Amino acid sequence: MTRRNKRIGNGVSGDEHQKKRRTKTGCLTCRTRRVKCDERKPACNRCETANLECAGYEGKRRLQIRRPRRPPIYQGEQAAGGLVPTFSGRVDVPPSPIFRADGLPLVGLPVNPTPSQRPHSRARDILAYHQFLFRTCPALFPFDRDHVWRDYLCEAAWEVEYVYDAIIALGSMHRATLLLSRGCKDDQHRGIDTKVIAVQAYTKAFQGLAEELSKSQRPKVLVVGVLVLFAFFEVLRALTFSPYQSIPLTVVA
């Protein structure tokens, strides 16, 4: 039995034996002669015995590793046509908003931001809602009655559209009043923008309330609550035109 037949008898087929590749690690001369090399360095012993010049060994291969591509970093440069993206090796982190600890607006939105920084309109609504919940309610209403406005009315706002718009309007106008009373020019610009948003929400809430009153002859508790919010809205809007706009809201209440 030949060696090939023995391998077949041991479970290794002839095709698998032919497919098995030999590792080529010998010197170039022995590989050309197709003889086994002893791999002695710098010149192998087999070439020296055969009185042949050993051509040496093949250099180590270098694998080209693909590194993950990183997205280009854009650094905004203000130009005449707007924001022009340029490539830069460092990242300019935009200034973080200033959180006040003096009872003034919860957070400030960017002044005339770029399109990439402009917050969604609903993000402004949530900001005004939180302003009403955490700043306006404690300033306007007594603590023992706070659950009516903070719990009942705010919970109804997620189901009744005109109640939600009324809360957004009053919260935004409260923020606008506080921002406009500041001496900082950036705060005053934010106050003007916030006041525009407040008037828009107020108009929308007024239209929704008018539709509700046209359907029902008997006013509901929510309608009365929204009318009270409208009254405070008008007071705050008048303060934005008054030289006494720095009066604390608790004095107005």
Image (spheres, grey):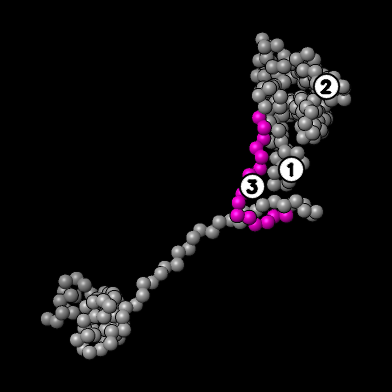
Height in image: 34 above or below 23? below
Say what amino acid the circle numbered 3 marks: Asp
Q: Which residue is at the front of the view, 34 or 42?
A: 42
Label 1 SS: loop
**Does any portion of residue 68 appear in the rendered image?**
yes
Viewer-nearest of discs 2 and 3? 3
- Residue 90 x %, y %: 60, 51
Q: Which residue is at the front of the view, 133 or 81?
A: 81
Cα–Cα span, label 1 and label 2:
27 Å
- From the viewer's perspective, tell me whether residue 130 is left or right of residue 194: left
- From the viewer's perspective, tell me whether residue 113 is left or right of residue 18: right
Cα–Cα span, label 1 and label 3:
16 Å
Q: What crowding class fits label 3: few (fewer than 14 Cα within 10 Å), some (14-19), or many (20 or more)? A: few
Report how many numbered discs are placed on residues in the image. Answer: 3
Circles 1 and 2 in contact, beta carbons < 8 Å:
no
Q: Which residue is drawn at 67% across and 52% down?
A: 75
Q: Residue at x 45, y 64 (%)?
A: 65
Q: Residue at x 79, y 33 (%)?
A: 185
- Span of residues in magenta: 84-99
Cα–Cα span, label 2 and label 3:
37 Å
Say what amino acid the circle numbered 1 marks: Pro
In magenta segment, residue 248: no
> What residue would you read off at disc 1?
113
Sequence-wise, the earlier of marks 1 and 3 is 3
> What residue would you read off at disc 2?
245
> What residue would you read off at disc 3?
92
Circles 1 and 3 in contact, beta carbons < 8 Å:
no
